Image (spheres, rainbow, N blue to C red):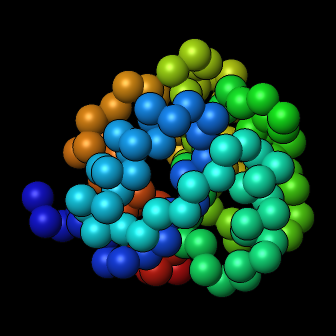
Amino acid sequence: GIASRGQGETILLVDDEEMIWDVISDMLSTLGYKVILAENGREAVEIYQNNPGEVDLILLDMIMPEMNAREAFFLLKKIDPEVKVLLSSGYVSEEDAQDVLNAGAQGFLRKPYRMADLAGKIRGILDETAKS
């Protein structure tokens, strides 16, 4: 329900597929989030670095050209040890993402996912931090 809606937080959506961008950014906007798009890990790192404090959560696709999610994650972590990253992929399993999860990524969402799954996951991660 309404409990898992966004409160205007900013999500950095990192994906190299335009079709996915459209669908997910629509979902995120509908849920009440602001969306910034990055085409790959390198761009995501740049955006995150240049906009300190602006991005509340990064939705990071595991499989991308240029720089993979693992590399991007560790660079993001270097910029901000508190960075919140939700990994997502249709091709890799949660086991494949495990080392990144162990390193501090907050969650993994398998594609394709429904808006409710996305909403719940993001809210869980953002609220978790609010509590601590």
Looking at the image, residue 21 lies above or below residue 36: above
In the picture provided, is 96 more to the left or to the right than 18? right
Image point (60%, 39%), residue name: 15
Looking at the image, residue 96 lies above or below residue 80: above
Residue that sits furthest to the bottom in the current view: 53
Residue that sits furthest to the left in the current view: 1
Image point (73%, 66%), residue name: 47
Name the one closer to the observer, 115 or 1: 115
Q: Which image quadrant is residue 97 in?
A: top right
Image point (63%, 35%), residue name: 16
Q: Position of residue 36 (x, y in %)?
A: 55, 63
* The N terminus - image quarter: bottom left
Q: Which image quadrant is residue 113 in?
A: top left
Q: Which image quadrant is residue 58 in?
A: bottom right
Q: Is residue 22 visible?
A: yes
Q: Position of residue 111 (x, y in %)?
A: 43, 26
Looking at the rendered structure, the number of numbered marks drawn on it comes to 0
In the picture provided, is 115 more to the left or to the right than 90? left
Image point (36%, 78%), residue name: 8
Name the one closer to the observer, 127 or 54: 54
Q: Is residue 103 visible?
A: no
Name the one closer to the observer, 52 or 124: 52
In the picture provided, is 108 more to the left or to the right than 82? left
Q: Position of residue 108 (x, y in %)?
A: 53, 38
